[in-house]
């Protein structure tokens, strides 16, 4: 589990593709690798990945073809800026919201514009996920816990304050770029309960 509060940004240093997926190296001088061990989980752009090797400023993860197909990693490239967060520990507070690291789909930035000191991002979510997105509810974009401001039939928007813009990959993204999206898990459980 994660919180959606990004601890550091990094880059994709290397992609080694094979017939069943890819082995990707993620590098960051700002991420704290001192407490990491092999087998730990790190969310990178919202995708829960398992550490298979690491050093003082990078770690390596094995991404299956399924993960590549279901996330923005299918279009990944070396040098891409990514968001990183270590798994939540039981003695740790939750500043964002509960995030599983299991991406539900790929969203797209339809618009991006400044409002005062902040930026507004207009996001198009996959049609099958829109019913889980609610005004003033939580959503995770590239691993970032965000609050939905408004929503219509095809889009929703989020307000990005300067701190979030400066400390995540959002500052490097433009209109048309893709984001991994995870909807609020509580909405999914409510749907399942009402069906039962």
Image: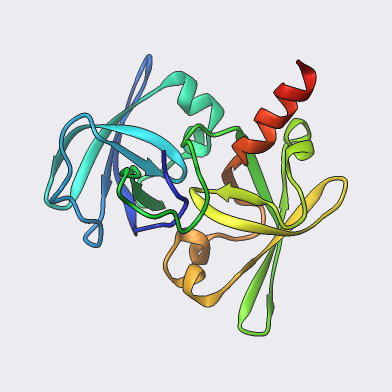
Q: How is the image coloured?
A: rainbow
Residue pictured at 66% horizontal, 52% vertical: 176
Residue pictured at 67% horizontal, 85% vertical: 116
Give how far across and how far down residue 54 sits, in percent: 15, 40
Quarter of the figure with residue 14: top left
Give how far across and how far down residue 91 sits, in percent: 30, 48
Return the residue nearer the eye: 131 or 191: 191
In the displayed structure, would residue 161 be above or below residue 141? below
Q: Decide if residue 3 is on the left or right side of residue 34.
A: right
In the picture as drawn, the residue positioned furthest to the right comes out as: 153
In the displayed structure, would residue 141 be above or below residue 174? above
Residue pictured at 38% horizontal, 42% vertical: 43
Q: Decide if residue 6 is on the left or right side of residue 104.
A: left
Give how far across and how far down residue 147 sits, in percent: 64, 58
Quarter of the figure with residue 157: bottom right
In the displayed structure, would residue 9 be above or below residue 60? below
């Amino acid at each position: 589990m994660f919180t959606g509060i990004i601890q550091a940004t990094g880059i994709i240093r290397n992609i080694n593709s094979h017939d069943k997926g890819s082995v990707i190296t993620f590098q960051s001088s700002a991420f704290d690798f001192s407490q990491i061990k092999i087998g730990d989980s790190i969310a990178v752009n919202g995708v829960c990945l398992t550490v298979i090797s690491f050093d003082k400023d990078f770690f390596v993860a094995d991404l299956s073809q399924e993960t590549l197909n279901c996330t923005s990693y299918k279009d990944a490239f070396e040098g891409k800026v990514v968001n990183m967060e270590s798994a939540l520990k039981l003695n740790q507070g939750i500043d964002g919201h509960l995030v599983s690291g299991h991406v539900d789909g790929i969203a797209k930035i339809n618009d991006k514009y400044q409002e005062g000191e902040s930026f507004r991002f207009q996001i198009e979510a996959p049609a099958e996920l829109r019913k889980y997105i609610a005004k003033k509810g939580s959503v995770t974009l590239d691993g970032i816990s965000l609050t939905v401001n408004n929503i219509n039939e095809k889009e929703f928007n989020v307000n990005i304050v300067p701190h979030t813009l400066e400390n995540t990959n959002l500052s490097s993204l433009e209109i048309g770029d893709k984001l991994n999206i995870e909807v609020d898990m509580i909405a999914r459980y409510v749907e399942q309960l009402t069906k039962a």
